[in-house]
Image (cartoon, rainbow, N blue to C red):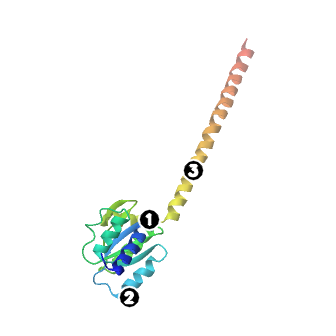
Amino acid sequence: MARPDKAAAVEELTKQFSDASATVLTEYRGLSVKALRDLRRALAGNATYAVAKNTLAQIAAKQAGVDGLDAHLAGPTAIAFVSGDVAAAAKGLRDFAKTNPHLVIKGGVMDGRVLDAEAVKKLADLESREVLLAKLAGAMKGNLSKAAGLFVAPLSQVARAAQALADQKTPQATDE
């Protein structure tokens, strides 16, 4: 890699691989420039979408410590570097692929694990981060209510048992 432009491209890709929480590799063959611009706008805020040469992407991925992408880096490749919500970015790619069948999701990497196309589609089926956090908060609130009931239960049981003993002793005293 003697050319400085290639070295700069590898350096930029390495930085993007390192900074991204996940990456999704796609094949963009057949998409128009307008369609690619629309896709970039759809991903804005969650991911950046860039076309990359496969050999440069392989070198950059290895330098960033990402292994296992070689099988996905064949044919024309564009990479979505996800910096925001991974599920939202995967949904954006999946929804765009539904309306533009030329976009093919090849796979990706998340948390150091290589994902195939099906795993990326499963990520897209996840609910948004806000919805998942709301469900978690609701579940925690419900569990706290149950815990409070459990802490109060022994006291009320003791009170009922004491009252039962008092009621039991009262009739015996009058019989004698």
Residue highlighted by disc 3: 142
Observer-nearest of 152 and 160 = 152
Residue type of the residue flagged with mark 2: Lys
Residue type of the residue flagged with mark 1: Ser
Q: Secondary structure at mark 3?
A: helix
Q: Residue at x 36, y 65 (%)?
A: 63
In the image, is residue 136 above or below residue 11? above
The answer to whether mark 2 and mark 3 are in CB contact below 8 A is: no
Question: For residue 147, which quarter of the picture?
Answer: top right
Cα–Cα gap, marks 2 and 1: 27 Å
Q: Position of residue 176 (x, y in %)?
A: 73, 11
Residue highlighted by disc 2: 34
Classify residue 73 as left or right of residue 159. Answer: left
Q: Nearer the viewer, mark 2 or mark 1?
A: 1
Residue highlighted by disc 1: 21
First in sequence: mark 2 vs mark 1: 1
Observer-nearest of 125 and 78 = 78
In the image, is residue 3 above or below residue 121? below
Cα–Cα gap, marks 1 and 3: 32 Å
Neighbor class of circle 3 (other Cα within 10 Å; few <14, some 14-19, many 20+) is few
Q: Position of residue 122 (x, y in %)?
A: 36, 63
Q: Position of residue 54 (x, y in %)?
A: 28, 74
Neighbor class of circle 2 (other Cα within 10 Å; few <14, some 14-19, many 20+) is few
